[in-house]
Amino acid sequence: MKMMKETIVVKIGGNASDNLPSTFFEQIKTWWSMGKRVLIIHGGGPQISEWSEKLHLDVEKINGVRVTDPETLDVTKAVLLGLVQPKLCQFLANSGLPVIGLNSSDNHLLEGKYLNQSQYGEVGQVTHINSKWLSQELENQIGVLAPLAQTKDGHWLNVNADTAAAKIASQLQAEELVLLTDVPGVLNSGKVVPQLTETFANELFQQHVIKSGMMPKIKASFAALKNGVHQTFITNDLGRPGTQFQYVEK
């Protein structure tokens, strides 16, 4: 009987993707040499905002969600698939790793539905993942995936990369989900919280210690744990654990 390979899902924010340290590539190589499947899901928020401003498009967020009109969606697709993804793939290839760029049009990879069209526009949430096809692709190469989904009738949707990563990691029953960001973990009084429960996270949020930008990452981390992912972390360096999330059954 063939053993199932363990899967690691890494989500990279737009800021992090421009400043990847050598430890990032070393850890990816280590996982790959251990026979693990690796999927990298990348955002591109700062780059999307930068190009939107260059094109004189409004940059608006509600509750941390980018309001996405059709023009902003075009910019989002162009930036993620034309700038951020090729750059990441090139970095990995230059490190001697086999890599493939992926998006929702590959074998209906990510299907989605509108989150709230009247409020957010062309923003969605992932409803279905072609996990069988994705797992096969990850057998022989590292996947680099943009968080864009398509509706059943082919409309593209902008999806929050943190929530997309949690959903995909859960579908793949990943061993580990790492949200790589530009801070070393969840901070309390300037120090990294090494382990975080939902109760403590809510306390820190109510005390305004955790800011709104971090909350989607924290919610995504707990959602992944509740849905079969074994471990979740937030860090700015794959070589350091940062904050590990703990799900306590109620």
Image (cartoon, grey):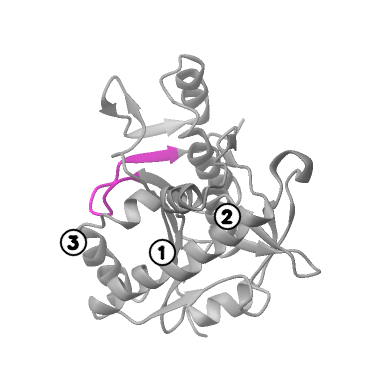
Query: Tag 2: residue type?
Result: Ala
Estimate the spatial distance between the alpha carbons at disc 2 and disc 3, rounded to whole Å: 26 Å
Q: Which mark is drawn over residue 84?
A: 1
Q: Which mark is drawn over residue 164?
A: 2
Q: Which mark is drawn over residue 22?
A: 3
Query: Tag 3: residue type?
Result: Ser
Depth-wise, is mark 3 or mark 1 nearer the camera?
Answer: 1
Discs 3, 1 touching: Cβ within 8 Å? no
Query: Tag 1: residue type?
Result: Val
Discs 2, 3 touching: Cβ within 8 Å? no
User: For the point 36% across and 73% down, which residue is it?
Assistant: 89
x%, y% of residue 78?
52, 65
Q: Residues within 10 Å of mark 3 (few under 14, many from 20)?
A: few
Q: Which mark is drawn over residue 112?
A: none
Estimate the spatial distance between the alpha carbons at disc 3 and disc 1, rounded to whole Å: 18 Å
User: Residue 236 magenta-drawn?
Assistant: yes
Sequence order check, earlier mark of 2 and 3? 3
Which image quadrant is residue 245 in? top left
Which image quadrant is residue 92 in? bottom left
User: Residue 202 magenta-drawn?
Assistant: no
**What is the magenta range?**
235-245
Q: Is residue 243 left or right of residue 127?
A: left
User: For the point 53% across and 38% down, which residue is it?
Assistant: 216
Q: Residues within 10 Å of mark 2 (few under 14, many from 20)?
A: many
x%, y% of residue 137?
51, 81
Sequence order check, earlier mark of 2 and 1? 1
User: For the point 57% across and 37% down, which residue is it?
Assistant: 61
Q: Is residue 220 left or right of residue 31?
A: right
Label 2 residue SS: helix
